[in-house]
Image (cartoon, helix red, strand yellow):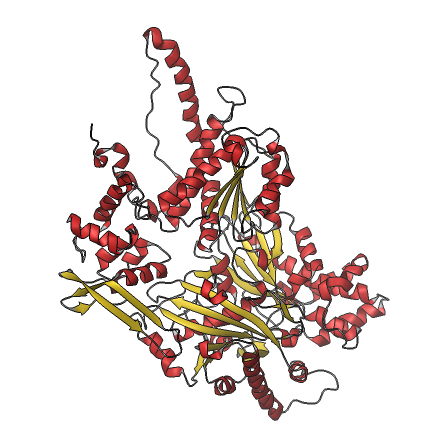
Amino acid sequence: MTVNLATLQTEQKNSRTTNIDTVSSLELCRKPVGPCMLDMGGGDAKSRRVVVGVINAEDRTVADAVETCLPQIAAAIDVSVAHLLAGGRIVYTGAGTSGRLGILDASEIPPTFSSPPGQFVGLIAGGDQAIRNAVEGAEDSEAQGAADLAALSPPLSKLDVLIGIASSGRTPYVLGSLKHARSVGAASIGLACVRPSAFDGQCDVLIECVTGPEVVTGSTRLKAGTATKMILNMISTGSQITVGKTYGNLMVDLKMSNEKLRDRARRVVRSAVPDNAAVNVEQDDVLDGLLARCGGDVKLSILVAALGCSPDDGRTHLQASAGSLRRALSDDRTRISPVQFSWTSAAVCTSTSGYPDTAISTTGILTSQGTTAPRIKMVVLNVLGLNCGTSVDGRLRPIFSRMTDRATNEQPGVDVAHCRISSDQSLSDVRIELLQYTEVAVDPAIRSQVLRLCRPNQAGAAATSMAEVCDLNFALGREFARAVEQSGIDLAAVDLIASHGQTLWHEPAAEHRSTLQMAEPAVIAQQTKKTVVSGFRVAEVAAGRQGAPLSGFFEACLLSEPGVTRNQARTSGGWPTGNATVLLDATKTTSTDRSCSYFAFDTGPGNVFIDAAMRILTDGRQHYDRDGELGARGEAQIDIADVDAYLASEPYFGRQPPKTTGRELFSDDVARVLVERLQARGHSPEAIIATITRITAESVARAYEDFVLPHLAAGAVIDEIYICGGGAYNPNILRHLQARFPLSRVARLDQAPTRLEASAKEAVLFALLGFLCVCGRSVPVAADAETTEPAILGVVTPGDNYRDVMAAVVTDPAFGRSSTLGRILMVEPRQAEEA
């Protein structure tokens, strides 16, 4: 009998799930429950039906057990999506049936959704032979679980997600895997079928699906196995739907690897292409030709037919839409009115001065009445971000090059980040490739001049003249230009320089709010011949806001993850105070306003007191406490009373956010008072540094207690605390925060799933702000800001390439539309860049 594949029930379109890719992760997991009756039957086969009926009745309870875990499963989907979009992998690990189910799930994703090879990986205790035959004792080694993950190529890292599966929730092999995942900063999901389980506290998301006693005592391949399969189906399928692998419930990323799938691909294209499409796909020869020209790519074929664009333009637009067909089709500016199209051969070459040439040669350019179809244009700029946070706060640390991972400098200086940034302005997302990062030391004489101007009221100091102020502004401009020239970055490949400059003063809370950053952009533009964007903080203060921290939106876009409340804390920066960005999980906040996704504020002195105390105690020979060594030796002698007295005496700590501060409040002079007071009490240098370090750490902790925890619902906690800046390299600060928040994960920002070196964050931030400025785009505003009016941040100083830069931006058809930044996608540099 010949079977018509189109008539099979499994091949029919389910009318109840046509909009499955438009709902939330939690809604994605819910399924309608219909009536189900147990057929007891009769006659001689009655006993057999009763046995099967009992198994079936027991299996019916599995769905109810899974339903109780839907919030945790949704959180697992969201974690997986965040890491997949960042280029990470999903790695399953388990023993016996659990391991086989993980391997099964990992094996089915590539043919179903065309996921890249190696993106989903399954491991089983005992190795591949254990897939078919039990390997005795293989599950009893925690060390082997960790070793198998380390043996992956590449080894498990912070980019990846580990799903540890064990019905018992205690398998040593899986426990070792989960512990290893936490040690390398990977996200981890634990899946057990008991509660409580040994997985508690060992993973980021814990799913405990209690399925109860099995039909055959202890045989967890039955209900527990069924529940495990259902949950893994939800996580993997839900994550693929969310990243855009379906259109509605249509499998638009399938691989046409056999006749059944080729037949399905044709039906999917016809079902998805709208009636008014540019290409009529009802004719078999037209549809097959379209699929051939698109290389068998079903998603691309739908887009090309719907929009009337070339396959190359379709690929570009899909890339700009992060692979989402729904988003690509919703961009009205690329649509073409229904007309008769014909296929012609064409070669298109576009080149803009200052940009890498892009040559596209194809036999599939769609033309309408002899006219080439409108191209989908993305803005792509190579931007240098410059930040000078260390010239004032004195933070010294090894500096690493993105391309070499070798320490290149140990002096404070100008951070230089070379980024390729791209964006289709009709969409809200941008893609950032960090091509290279380095730091160039600042002239010590200029650094001393900056410090002196930041301390105008120092006893015995001469008054600052306007000549000195002007001279420093130009000197810093020359220093920034020199940093660019000495960074090793090819200026010919650079389109734009974005410079934050050096903050000298910041008074956003005064009656006449103001701020001052120096490093004359005209000097940088003149010496490099490149267009410069600066004045980001000035623009933010002029808009009526605090102007610091500027990085809040950046961290929110990079780190936001449904189901997780995060704090991103910085203990030093361009304006060397501690600051915090708080990313709220809407399900855990007390606020009824679900738009309040993040807020940011300065917490206190950051590293400024520690660094100043080191200079005072060493007569300027040491500028910072390397690795917290001196403070660690004095921890047993910390003057807790002095810590409490200072924190209680400074009104800033009690002020509600939004708030920001700087050296006008937390100055070297205040640090000297603290040092002299502690010396008068007979404290050693070690005890003094330990006490002042505790002031910084405790100011951060109390800021969390006073201004973050009140936003959380009863019983909710801060899930993760990431530290960057100088404090990230001081173990004493990290240990104290972990002790104060034992239920939170405290780690350096390097260990967060951002694909971004923590030390490069500020320079990359300013590169992004420069890009957004010339593109005429605003950034998201914090929930607690004094005003939420959007503002374009930055001032443009033209260089020799100004016309070329602006021509590349304003020729985008969407230029001039009001557009606010959405997601930030950090991506790895193209292989050609690393060769």
Tell me the quarter of the picture where residue 508 sits. bottom right
Farthest-out residue, bottom? 467
Front residue (pair 547, 433)? 433
Q: Position of residue 726 (x, y in %)?
A: 65, 66
Q: Position of residue 322 (x, y in %)?
A: 38, 57
Front residue (pair 667, 525)? 525
Residue 260 lies left or right of residue 585; in this view the side is left
Q: Is residue 202 visible?
A: no
Q: Is residue 589 visible?
A: yes
Front residue (pair 72, 803)? 803
**Residue 637 versus residue 534 in the image, above or below:** above
Residue 567 lies left or right of residue 223; in this view the side is right
Farthest-out residue, right? 682
Q: Position of residue 567 (x, y in %)?
A: 56, 57
Residue 604 lies left or right of residue 12; in this view the side is right
Farthest-out residue, top? 44
Residue 320 lies left or right of residue 765; in this view the side is left
Q: Position of residue 195 (x, y in %)?
A: 56, 32
Quarter of the image that includes the N terminus? top left
Front residue (pair 660, 329)? 329
**Residue 643 versus residue 717 in the image, above or below:** below
Q: How many marks?
A: 0
